Amino acid sequence: MTNEKECPLEAALRRAAEEPGHRPEFYRLLLESSVLILGHSNTSHGTQTLEAGETISIQNWVRDDGSPVIPFFTSLTALHRSIEQEVTYMALPARSLFEITKGSPLVLNPKSSYGKEFFPNEIEALLAEGVNQLPKQRVAYKATKVLLGQPADYPSKMVDSLTTLLSKHSNVKAAYLALMHDPSKDTKPHLVVGIEVDGEIENVMREAGVVASDSAPNGGPVDLIQIERGDLGLSEYFVHEVKPFYERRWGSKLKSLLGIGHA
């Protein structure tokens, strides 16, 4: 924890650094927020807000290896923590910053207790999908035999992080875990997570993919599938053979519907 007063974006950044399950929420808030950059426009000086069509100069820093990086900040307090001399800075939406600096690496809150470097591929994913990783889809075009079981070394950290995330989505009914091996494609087994929802699932899958990737043991691959009751194959295995690691609490959902609380 910090003794300094945090703005909402800084609090979200701290939570994201401490727990992968909070990272999609941080990315969502970042894209909705304004940030500070070191630089100036061609029309004014001092604290500024970028106007449409305005030309701006953005200051780059040089890392130890000689490569450039653009610093940006969640608040004036975070900026002052990194800069000792008087500087010119500007406020602009984070989304606009990402759009006008495409192809360049950026670093959020350098010299602070919690920071985040953004690489060009992450920024591209944020602008396209709202999360920092573009999903990769695998489609089975024909019936395929796979081996399914439970992992001997249970990935407790990943499961805890996914539970943190999924509990934020009231339409998620349950989530399951298994170890799957497709000998025709994979040299060794990998984890697969099945998620059962009411209604729309794309956003849940995007966010769960980020969390699973960031928390998987040894950075190993994790597949995500939608569980649909009545389907054969993987859905049937998860529903009938596996105890879910996450289940929506119906009592909490009822309270939410009555306006008492949240699921």
Image (cartoon, rainbow, N blue to C red):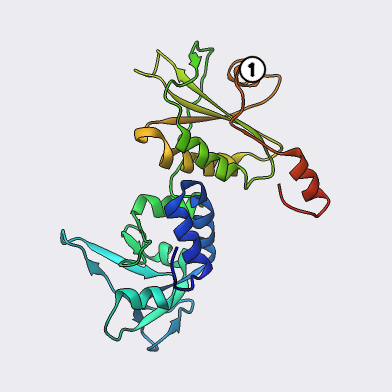
Among the 4 quarters of the image, the one containing residue 152: top left
Q: Which residue is drawn at 71% across and 19% down?
A: 230
Amino acid type of the residue tagged 1 in the rendering: Glu
Q: Within 10 angstroms of label 1, few (less than 14), some, or many (20 or more) residues?
A: some
Among the 4 quarters of the image, the one containing residue 75: bottom left
Q: Viewer-proximal residue, 245 or 121?
A: 245
- Residue named by callout 1: 236
Q: Residue at x 64, y 17 (%)?
A: 236
Among the 4 quarters of the image, the one containing residue 242: top right
Q: Which element carries disc 1, helix, strand or loop?
A: helix
**Residue 16 horizontal/vertical position (percent):** 46, 54
Question: Which residue, as the protein is rendered here, is positioned at the far left?
Answer: 65
Q: Is residue 194 above or below residue 199?
A: above
Q: Residue at x 64, y 45 (%)?
A: 169
Q: In which quarter of the image is the N terminus?
A: bottom left
Q: Is residue 131 found left or right of 260 in the rendered image?
A: left
Question: Which residue, as the protein is rendered here, is positioned at the far right?
Answer: 258
**Residue 239 horizontal/vertical position (percent):** 65, 21
**Residue 218 horizontal/vertical position (percent):** 34, 34
Q: In this view, does 149 lie above or below 214?
A: above
Q: Residue at x 52, y 67 (%)?
A: 33
**Residue 144 horizontal/vertical position (percent):** 50, 12
